[in-house]
Image (spheres, grey):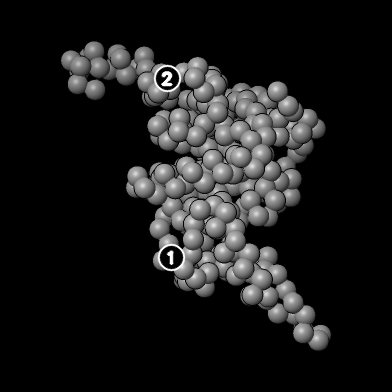
Amino acid sequence: MSTPLIELKNIEKHFGSVIALNGVSISVYPGECHCLLGDNGAGKSTFIKTMAGVHQPTRGEIFMDGQQVVFNTARDAIEAGIATVYQDLAMIPLMSVTRNFWMGREPLRSVGPLKFIDFEMANRVTMEEMDRMGIHLREPSQAVGTLSGGERQTVAIARSVYFGAKILILDEPTSALGVRQTSNVLATIDKVRKKGIGVVFISHNVRHALAVGDRFTVLNRGQTLGTAKRGEIEAEELQDMMAGGKELAQLEGSLGGTV
């Protein structure tokens, strides 16, 4: 295989006496969707925030394109090409799709000594990028809050791709969506992957992960339980690893098979 876009080795993260991550490793290759699976409290959020520069690891190493890097801030990670789409999407519902797409990076045009936002260009680019992702807006000036949850996810993803993301981290992008909206988001992830961008898809939904994933890493209580390629593992096994299969089996036995 080629050199990973990003590789995290033996990452530990301590918050005082609490060990949130204990030796977690993951690699992401160009054009790959690597799914990071785990139940609530598994360490997924801490791990992606470490990857995104929000947290600095207590121990461990991070490599990009084979070179060791240190992210002291989230800005460092963004400048290195890591874009993170969190569940809250960082959008302002009453502002237009265009303003949310550009969010402080609006193109400017000069009129004499003054500079103004070039809304003609901004609207055109927004429409083009959304079209590429399969979302056809009525009007780029419409409030982003009028879009469906899946469409807002697509705005956030298209924004990251347009501004040069090499690695796209998606934090539970389908957790609050219906079936149709989920299908649209998964289709968008597939389009992004085909552009050669590495996607880290965080989820606790095995079915959604299997729909788009190339490799799957399971976290449980801050530790990696294993990584498997597509076709090497079944949904039931992944679900079992996430939930702590032995513990559930013991509980089921004690409750007479009611779990």
Q: Earlier in the sequence, mark 2 or mark 1?
A: 1
Q: Is residue 55 visible?
A: no
- In this rendering, the label closer to the viewer, 2 or 1: 2
Residue annotated with mark 1? 145
Q: Residue at x 61, y 33 (%)?
A: 32
**Position of 13 relative to 147 (above/below):** above
Q: Quadrant of the C terminus?
A: top left
Q: Residue at x 55, y 21 (%)?
A: 229
Residue found at the very far bottom of the displayed protein? 112
Q: CA distance from mark 2 to mark 1?
A: 38 Å
> Identity of the amino acid at label 2?
Glu
At label 1, counting other C-alpha atoms closer than 10 Å, the crowd grade (few under 14, some 14-19, many 20 or more) is some
Q: Is residue 199 visible?
A: yes
Query: What element does badge 1 sit on?
Result: helix
Residue situated in front as seen by the camera: 156 or 11: 156
Where residue 240 sits, quadrant-wise, is top left
Q: Is residue 40 left or right of residue 118?
A: left
Query: What element does badge 2 sit on?
Result: loop
**Position of 12 relative to 181 (above/below):** above
Q: Residue at x 75, y 80 (%)?
A: 115
Q: Is residue 258 left or right of residue 162?
A: left
Where residue 108 sits, quadrant-wise, is bottom right
**Position of 249 relative to 87 (above/below):** above
Q: Quadrant of the N terminus?
A: top right
* Residue 27 coordinates in the image, percent (x, y): 65, 28
- How many numbered marks appear? 2
> Identity of the amino acid at label 1?
Gly
* Residue 210 coordinates in the image, percent (x, y): 45, 30
The mark found on residue 60 in the picture is: none
Residue annotated with mark 2? 234
Look at the numbered discs 2 and 1 and tell me whether their residues touch, using CB distance below 8 Å: no
